[in-house]
Amino acid sequence: MASIQAALGAAFLMPWLPAAAQSTLASDAEPAWAAMPASLLPMRLPVGATPGWVVRATAADVEAADATPVRAIEGDWQRYAPRGGRNVALQSARIELAATRRSWELAAVARSEILIEGSRDAFDIVHAYKQRQDPADGSMFAPRAHADGVVWAGLRGARSWALGAGTDPALQLTGALTLLSVRRVQQVDASGRVQFDTALGYAFDAQTLRQDSHRQFGGYGRRDATGSGYTVDLGLLWQPSADSFVNLSAVDVLSRLRVDGVSTEQATLSSTTDALDANGYLNYRPLVMGRDASATLDFRLSRKWSASAGSRVAGWGGEMLAGARWERVGAVDLPALWAVVPLAPGWRLQIDGELRFRSIGVGLKTRHASVLLRTQSLTVSRSHALGWQVEFSLPL
């Protein structure tokens, strides 16, 4: 709440700002879509139509979790506050160095992505384990969880096409192709049934599948196996006027990646360690049964959809930008409201309120640089969402 009040307080300073600062956005040649705050996930925006070369460097990282503060995920989960249904944890980090000219872009890109989705039961079991606590007598759980993680680097080419006449077309279509090298991939699936009885203890049946290109299971697979692939991004920008825009983006909308020699572990866990065979003899079974193997992994990157819109509006004696954004990855929706307020000639305050994890992003933007910090709580160790982005651009 304190972070929200601080962000709104800055906006209410508008009536006392100098008139020159209030008119910054109106007189700035930069299009409205280029001034909005950074999104949580990668977004496909148009390539800036500059007559000469412009070099841009970007670094960003976002982490968020439902059940625990992000800095405590690997801890004891003392501050455990899960959602009632599906819970998620995600991380998205990227570094880009791009050169643009006219409507063309060439960029070197590195990304890291992790998405974990699980039922409330799955998170409750992990919490009990980390706290070394037994559930209530008679508790029954049906855990289900899935995790994807990938690290890759590559070269991207992109171009924007004007769909219409004039120097400032109403529609722009952007396409991007990235040829990439997979540096690491992890996938985990788990499901089962768990019951706890005070007198008898745990009874469980579970199935797990783990694939990891960075390690070996039972000596199978290549340690630090790498692969290759490609991914395609698409974007469509509509500018009904010079003061408003709508941008639709699909990142990794079409992708295919392949890694050979991925270590794979498939296991079945059961508390029932004996059974009768067809002849009535007692068979003893191990607590964990499974097999290890080396496999070729063909997979796709998680698609990142987004829609953003904004418009210049008059308010508090000046002019500002205000808008909304919706992002989606997997089954996770990330709606947000944002505003850009002029502070002084060439300086802007960016405010971004994300609603899924209730985080606030506050940033500063100048002509050639921007920085934005995001948190859900001013006490970082208790925040369920943390993020930052830094960008520099230099005309050549």
Image (cartoon, grey):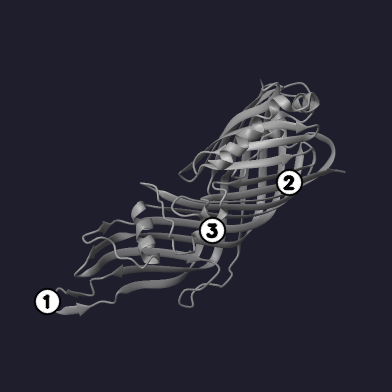
How many circles with numbers are drawn on the protein?
3
Q: Position of residue 200 (x, y in %)?
A: 20, 70
In this picture, is 374 found above or below 193? above
Depth check: 265 or 97 in front?
A: 97
From mark 3 to mark 1, how far is it between C-alphas? 54 Å
**Which dot marks residue 71?**
3
Q: Is residue 390 left or right of residue 186?
A: right
Say which element carries label 2. strand
Q: Position of residue 234 (x, y in %)?
A: 62, 38
Quadrant of res 181:
bottom right
Q: Residues within 10 Å of mark 3 (few under 14, many from 20)?
A: some
| Residue type, label 2 | Glu
Say which element carries label 1. loop
Q: Residue furthest left?
A: 280
Foreground: disc 1 or disc 2: 2
| Residue type, label 1 | Gly
User: Residue drawn at (33%, 68%), measured in percent from left and top?
Assistant: 268
| Residue type, label 3 | Arg
Q: Residues within 10 Å of mark 1 (few under 14, many from 20)?
A: few
Q: Position of residue 26 (x, y in %)?
A: 76, 24
Q: Is residue 46 visible?
A: no
Q: Quadrant of the C terminus?
A: top right
Residue named by callout 2:
391
Residue named by callout 1:
280
Foreground: disc 3 or disc 1: 3
Mark toward the start of the polypeptide (3 vs 1): 3
User: Residue drawn at (67%, 37%), measured in percent from left and top?
Assistant: 350
User: Residue drawn at (70%, 21%), measured in percent from left and top?
Assistant: 317
